[in-house]
Structure formats: structure tokens, C-alpha cells
Image: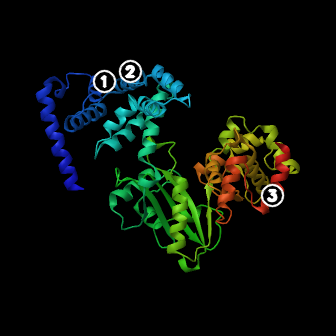
Amino acid sequence: MKWINRLIGSVTDKGKELLNAEDPARIKGKYSLQDDCTALLSYRGDATALAMAHQILDRYAASSRDEKIAFFHYLSSDLSPDFEKLSSLALALSNDNDADAETAYKQLQATLNDGRKTLFELLNIPGSGTPALVQMRSELLDLLPTHPELSVVDIDLKTTLETWFNRGFLEFKEIDWHTPADVLERLIEYEAVHEIKDWADLKRRLSGDRACFAFFHPALPDDPLIFVQVGFTADISERIDPFLNHAQPVSDLSAANTAIFYSISNCQTGLRGISFGNFLIKQVVQHIQTERPHIKYFSTLSPIPGLTRSIDKNYLTEDELQEIAGPLLISLQKRYAELSLTELLKDRSDRLDESHEDTVSFLNELGLYYLTQVKRGSEPYDPVARFHLSNGASIYRINPFGNRKNYGLKSSAGLMVNYLYDLERVEMNHEEFKQKGTIDVHPQLQKNKKRLRALS
């Protein structure tokens, strides 16, 4: 790689010389960033185009927020495809007997990709181009809430990145304590589900009865795109605490029969919406089956991050919560007399009594109702549920008090869920979920599911 970087650097330096000889004002930054982009789209020489692309990326990185907003508006307005030409070409293609249909189709594709998408391709220079464009999209996503008119730029940038980050380019790696320190530091930085507090915490998560797997990309060789943490256990775990306690003794790996996926973290904000997790889980399962053949069962111990948010947004009302409680309601009202169920779950979940049997029963009913009946369109409202159910997993068990840490209480009143990856059912479950919206629920929960469906 070093000799390739030296070669690219040499070509870039030559391009700067040629560019300086041709237009000294441009190499000295006398033109605007937008002018440089327009000029890049007309350059045909590889050396000068490479030098121009470097200059544009450097200037963008050094720009202020207002300058970046102006740049994105330029991409949105000045570099849009020629829609009149697209309409004409599409009309020509609608005539099946048109002898020039092949030519029209090629022109249609070229016109559609002209402008923004061509610029993104030209800026994808070896070494620094891909990371710079991932960072550019991260900044664009931050702007979209206040500048929705820039969404067309995001569509083109996202589809371009999807092409570069497709499954064929991803590199699968198992991470251990001997992985380079800069990669390990990024695990601590990127962990999005259960904070890694320090190096001792990380080391325990990489010890004998634990593992970590990640996807990398050649353009970001030391920067994971996504990683999953796995614990090997003798049963399907109900609580997160043992996985997060770095003082927990290392258990005998040979006694384990289950792999628990307890944390999945996407690392690159600029790749939001580009899915890697489904590929990663399947790859991890295959790897574990090969390297640890005594592991027979694959389950998650997952958060339910949208639960209290759905109550806050009134997707789950007080009346619905009372219906879910059913005959347990009187007992709950007696136990938490001064609090409504809404208040209890949203603001005072620390008051939930684990020793109170009816509280545990209610939370089981609530978790299953939320995951199967509270929807966003035809799919579950909960983002983690959508992810695992779309992958073909089943809802195996609701775990009241699975996470009693502050963030677990705040987001889901402490509830967690096991999604089971039954390898004989995964593909069928995936097809049923995608085609019919069918959520596979383990037989032990089916009775509750039928009752709760009647409430919805």
C-alpha cells in the first residue's frame, strides 16, 4: 500500500504543477469551492483531476458551517440532472420498437448520473476520498432537519456510498486483545449500546468466554464500520449485568452451548441507513459454527429502545396500558397508588418492584404487546425489533428487569428481549416478515400474543 500511496502522491504533485501552469489563480484558491467543482467536472487529465479533487476536499474540510451549507445548495441546484432530457429519453425508451432504445438507455443512465453523482465519483480519490465523503455525508445529515431541501443531495450521496460499501468489499475480522491499539480505541469510542468504560472493561469483553467481530472496508482499514459483541453461555441470558461487569470470572468456554449477541454498534454516522448488520450477524454465525462447533444456539439480548418513547408520543396511551394490564391492574394500582402506569413507566421506572409478581407479569405482557402491536406502517415501531425480525429472528422471551441501569430504565423501563436465530427457520421467518409482516413468536409466548392482538 505504501508504494501505491507514493505513486498517487507523485501523480498528484505532477497534477498540481500542470494545474499551476494552466491556471495559477486556481491552485492558489482564488476561485470559490463551487467554481473548483464545476471545473473538475470538465477536466479530463488524470493528474490534474486528481490534484483538483485533493484541493476541493481540503477546501471543503476547512470551510465554515455557512460555507458548507452554500456548497450543498450548489450541489442541489446547479448539479441536478437534466430532467427535461431524462423525460425525453424515457419517452424514447417507452417505444419497444425504437431501434435506438439501447443508445437511449445508455444516455438515460449517463444523464441521471451526471452532475452530483459524477462529482462524488471524481472526489473518491485513493487514500482520502472515501473517508472524506463519509464525513461529508455525516455533516449533511446534521443539516437536513433545518435544510430539508438538501435531501436530494443526500439521496445521491447515500446511493453512491452504498455502491462503494456493498457486501463484496467488506472485510470480516475477529477482534481480540492483540488487535492494534488504534482499532481497540475506536471500539471504546464507538460502542453505542453499553458503554465501554475503560481498557479493563474492554479487555474483559475480549476474554475467553467473549468475542467481538467487525466489518472493515479497504478505504478505512483501521476504522470499523460495525461491530458485534458476543458472550458464550450455557443458556439464553436474561440480564445484561454479567456481560458488563469486568470483574465477572471467565467461564469455561467448553461448557457453553449458546452465543449471545449483546451489543451491535454502527460506527460511521456518514453511512447511516446503509445496512451492514444483517450481513455481519450471518457471517458471525457461520464463523462461530466453524471455529466453535459446540455452540448450537444463537440469540440476542437486546434493548427495547423505543418503548418509553412510544408512550411519550402517545402511541401507547394510559388506556391501552390499563387494557394490557387487564386483571393485573387492581394489584398494580394498589402497589403504585400515587402513579399512573404512564408515569410509572416513563418517569419512575426505578420504582418498579422486581419482587412483585404482578409487576413482572405486566411487564412481560407490555413488552410483547409493544414489539408485536405498536407499528410504524406495517412494521414494528421499535428499530431493534425491525432489524432482528427482518433478519429472520423470532421473539423468544421478554426479560423484565433485564437492564436496570439508568439508560435501560429511561429507554425501556428496564425491559430487554431475546431474539432467537433458529437456523432452520431464519430464511422462512425473513420471507414471512418481508412479504406479510408476520412476526415469529416462540411457542411459549403465543398464548399471550393472541390475547394481546385482541386488544389492538
Choose the circle earlier in sequence order: 2 or 3: 2
Q: Label 1, secondary structure: give it.
A: helix
Viewer-proximal residue, 388 or 102? 102
Measured as percent of width and height from the top left, residue 16 is found at: 15, 35
Viewer-proximal residue, 258 or 428? 428
Are the two marked residues, 2 and 1, in contact with CB atoms closer than 8 angstroms?
Answer: yes
Whole-angstrom CA distance, mark 2 to mark 3, is 56 Å
Which residue lies under the disc numbered 1?
34
Are the two marked residues, 1 and 3, in contact with CB atoms closer than 8 angstroms?
Answer: no
Viewer-proximal residue, 327 or 417? 417
Q: Label 2, secondary structure: give it.
A: loop
Measured as percent of width and height from the top left, residue 68 is found at: 36, 27
Which residue lies under the disc numbered 3?
446
Look at discs 1 and 3 and give the one toward the viewer.
Answer: 1
Q: Amino acid at mark 2?
A: Asp
Q: Is residue 280 visible?
A: yes
Which residue lies under the disc numbered 2?
78
